[in-house]
Image (cartoon, rainbow, N blue to C red):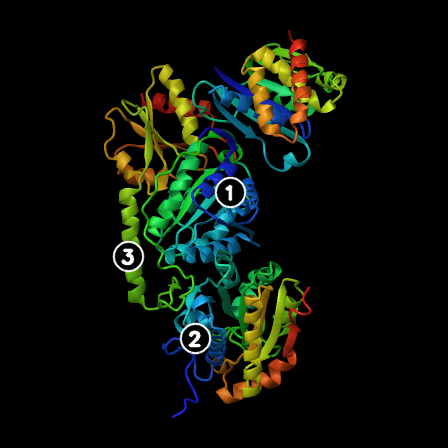
Amino acid sequence: MNEKFIFAGFGGQGVMLMGQLITYAGMFEDLEVSWLPSYGPEMRGGTANCSVIVSDKAVASPVISFDATTAVVMNLPSMDKFEQEVEKGGKLFVNSSLIERKSEREDIDVYYINANEVANELGNAKAANMVMLGAILEVTKVVTPESVLKALAKIFGTAKAHLIPLNEEALKRGAELVK
Amino acid sequence: MAVVFEKTKGLTEKETHYCPGCTHGIIHRLVAEVLEELDVLGETVGVAPVGCSVLAYEYFNCDMQEAAHGRAPAVATGIKRALPDKVVFSYQGDGDLASIGTAEIVHVAHRGEKITTIFVNNAIYGMTGGQMAPTTLIGQKTTTSPLGRDSNLTGFPLRMSEMLATIDGAVFVERVSVHNPAAIRKAKKAIKKAFEVQLEGKGFGIVEVLSTCPTNWGMTPVKALGWLEENMIPYYPLGNFKSPEEAK
Amino acid sequence: MAKVLMKGNEAIGAAAINAGCRYFFGYPITPQNELPEYMSRELPKVGGVFVQAESEVAAINMVYGAAGSGVRVMTSSSSPGIALKQEGISYIAGAELPAVIVNIVRGGPGLGSIQPSQSDYNQSTRGGGDGDYHLLVYAPANIQEMVDLLQEAFDKADFYRNPVMVMGDGMIGQMMEPVEFKERPEVDLPPKDWAATGTEGKRKPNVINSLFLKPEELEDHNIRLTEKYDAMKKNEQQWETYNMEKPEIICVAYGTTARIVKSAIDTLKAEGIEIGLIRPILVWPFPEKAFVELPETAKMFLSVEMSMGQMIDDIKIVNQGRLPVEFYGRSGGMIPSPDGVVQKIRALLGGAK
């Protein structure tokens, strides 16, 4: 296995967290992992993205350059930027709640997930990233939802522990969308 | 026979390299006497500058560290933070403190570091041979202002004590002189007070000491003392600009 | 201890605290800001001190002061900030004080960029400050190695009474990888009886100084320093080799670039093309011992760098004219891709036939 993920969206959509959860979960499953954020002035407002590699061999380069096995785009600028970075035969997860256009790629599998709407149904718009993550885990099987929940508990700590049931539900709803 | 005079234990036996008539020797002695009187010589680390007093580490009879030009306040900060219970002072000239080291002196005051700075202002670069300093007086001839300092070209002399007194972290700021015995006595009082402020943990203290440079001013030592009194004191008024009672 | 996932810059901070560093003087500059932020948060919890200086120049001079007091002290910055620190680094070397300087390298010259780079090779290995001096310069390739070597750096700094640089790049500073803080063996180090901590009336004053006005004294000092650097050259070379049994080309790469080269080597090996790697773990002293015996199959060296080729000179020195030295690099924040390295190697082999 050598999965290369790009997660992209605007600040506040939790794209860095999605990447970190998969990275942590991979570590819990004794896989080799790396997480590399974009950094610089664009972090302060516009788009945010991170590259995550989960592999059964030591990670050579944490950089993903037009060889992503999976790209996750949460808003239109991210779709415009990263749609072409997915390698042939790879996967693209599109947040169709915010992105109206369809992918131009015909050589990859594209999944349209109305993440924000489902999150709203759950009563918390902020859970859109977890709905998306649920779909990603169901399709890619890169790590188990249990490992992701363990990672979430670690990141949330006690202060945000009460949010875990909501996030667990969001993961499940996301998975159902692609079953 | 009763002892009427003794050399301070605060200075080493080393003969200084200072020019005849230079007042650095007096100022060294005042600092050393104060450290001895406060009984802190064994708990003191001094920081020597770059300039005429670059070899101060050979004269003060306590642990010393030699700083790069202008950086003595930063070096002193590192020492004081590592050794908060020790007495730390920097000894700096006007080229060192008022020119290349302005950022360091402003920010040591800004942080309120609990150190003491002895600032020796003789209105000229002595060590390098008499170039213009930020503190050089208008009209004063130096090797880089051969026609006399012209404010149109080089601005006006910097009054460091007044400037530093505006900074909340500077809790003791005083300008003194060593041009006659009465002034020297006052200078020693101020230096002692500055170290006491440090011992009480109140913040940053600085004593600016107006000093002569007979060699580079091109005067006899006696004439230089007179020149200081007549020219420097009117521009750099003596007195206390800040003491802990009025510091915030 | 279990593995934890940490960002490179934060792992450096944790490793420093683990190594007994309690004093940090820094100044903000991207891409190393998480390190001073971490230190400002964590050092007070262990009785340590964090000071945000007014400039890099002041920060390194605070390090110089604290090092003179005999404590374990560190600063960090990125390329243009390191350029500003060179004055202080020279003083620390001249006064023979231990200190650790972390450089998370970004693109230059000038303001350059904030993206990863290795264009501080010369600034680090040649010394940017005045005088005859050297630093030990570690160049870890991943966060685990960064953590292990950073702790070693403090011991070496104390042992040699010399500043030590640990050099990463923006990528290693920003990325997260699993890391384990291992039990460290106690190192027998000489007492710091030279430190200026106050005489307490019990000894003659200690003076921390790099000024020697008499030429014969300064020359003696330089000769003694050089003996120390010779000992480092003899004892501190570290390198890793990869696929060096029968390589046609020997790549030389350090830090994160070496990981990319390994990936390219694996790709080519699958096609039956044998390429080797010598990875300097310290770039000063350069691992000349690794270049003494070369496999007979080797036709050339290929230096792979995130710069315009600053390491080539060192490879040429240790190569002693035996093989051609080729170069592949990206700069300005562009990162070499494994495929780019593969293409370059193919071109070189094609050209050799």
Instruction: Name the chain letter of the residue that bears numbered label 3.
Output: C
Question: On residue C108, which mark appears?
Answer: 1
Q: Amino acid at mark 2?
A: Gly
For the question of whether residue A59 can be seen, the reply is yes
Q: Which residue is mark 3?
A: C224
Residue C283 x/y as whole percent: 37, 40
Q: Is residue C15 above or below residue B133?
A: above
Q: Amino acid at mark 1?
A: Gly
What is the quadrant of residue A57 in the picture?
top left
Circle 3 crowding by C-alpha within 10 Å: few under 14, some 14–19, many from 20: few
Q: Which residue is mark 2?
A: B10
Residue farthest to the bottom?
Answer: B1
Q: Is residue A175 left or right of residue B118?
A: right
Residue C79 x/y as whole percent: 50, 45
Residue C295 x/y as whole percent: 25, 27
What is the quadrant of residue A90 in the picture?
top right
CB within 8 Å, label 1 to label 2: no
